[in-house]
Amino acid sequence: MNKDENLAIDSAARLIADSSYVVALVGSGLSVESGIPTFRGPGGLWTRVGEPSMRGYEDFLSNPKLWWENQLAGETDAARIEFRDAIDAAKPNAGHFALAELEQLGVLQSIITQNIDDLHSVAGSRAVVEIHGNRTKLRCIGCEGRWHRHEFKTDEYPPECPDCGDLVKGDTVMFGEPIPPGVLQECIRETGRSDCMIVIGTSATVYPAASFPHEVKQSGGVLIEINTNSTPLTNIADVSIQGQSGEVLPLIVERVKKIGGLGS
Ligand code: APR
């Protein structure tokens, strides 16, 4: 790591240590070192298969039975099968564990993740808001009830919610589907409380998630960006570190611990 990168790591650690409500906003870049491709950029899933149509949710609502039949029949597109298999095989990387450690140290208050891979929970993070859902879960579109897929027993398709009778689908938010209101409220609450947002591995192009860093900045908070490339946030970030999140985050954690005399 060169002198400038060292300085950036120190500045980031100082900002984190001096803040009172630190929130991480995470994108697919954090899971790249777990073997999961990103969506955009070289090798990204949408780069390979094209962005899905914004009609996904509309199609589901117009024929939920067909949607479920397709789900049960399994994926046929090679790139999507590759993506699915990568997620199935993925384990948390040093970046996920670094965020879990920051939470255990009482330094990180929450994570807003755009990732559906469940790796934050597997790494031990507890305060995780999954704005785009979690692929291991099912969700009722009416009352937002959620179940782990293996807990939800049904032979009726489309499944009905046992609590309110509405439709049950995968928890992953589809293109064209509104963010579930309860989840969106949690994101807005965490963003409103945050005086420091660490933005990790996201192209910051998909809303409403991409709006959260701007809101923190506008309310006088600070932004730290960790990304292998520049993004629309790079110019407004207080500290922008170009690097792999799995390498950068552990270095930041070590500096924060030294500054705060935390955990030896
Ligand atoms: N470390 C840090 N950043 C990385 C790494 C890495 N090892 N590898 C890639 N990146 C960065 C890329 O430079 C890019 O800015 O991660 C970002 C990935 O961007 P996207 O592929 O657009 O993923 P994301 O921002 O999470 O997409 C947001 O779009 O399609 C929806 O639901 C999907 O949640 C996703 C949302």
Image (cartoon, helix red, strand yellow):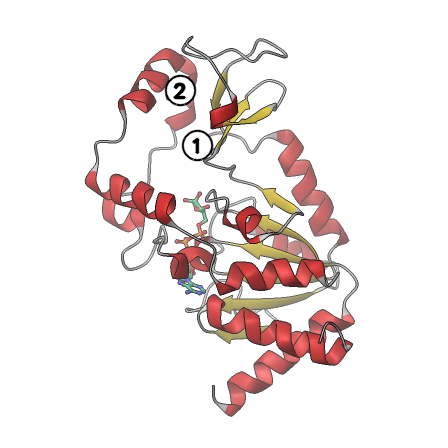
Say which residue appears at 46% left-offset and 44% top-offset.
Answer: 117
Figure quadrant of residue 34: bottom left
Other-residue count near label 2 (Cα within 10 Å), few / some / many at <14 / 14–19 / ≥20: some
Figure quadrant of residue 15: bottom right
Q: Secondary structure at mark 1?
A: loop
Cα separation between marks 1 and 2: 9 Å
18 left or right of 248?
Answer: right
Would you name the residue on which mark 1 appears? 174
Q: Position of residue 52 (x, y in %)?
A: 33, 36
Q: Secondary structure at mark 2?
A: helix
Would you name the residue on which mark 2 appears? 60
Say which residue appears at 37% left-offset and 12% top-offset.
Answer: 65
Q: Residue furthest front?
A: 264
9 left or right of 220?
Answer: left
Q: Are marks 1 and 2 in contact (CB under 8 Å)?
A: yes
175 or 236: nearer the viewer: 175
84 left or right of 209?
Answer: left
Q: Please report whichever mark, 1 or 2, sits nearer to the chain's N-terminal start.
A: 2
Q: Is mark 2 within 8 Å of ligand 1?
A: no
Say which residue appears at 43% left-offset and 25% top-offset.
Answer: 57
On screen, 181 above or below 108?
A: above
- Inspect the image, locate mark 1, and give the three-letter code of the amino acid beneath it: Met
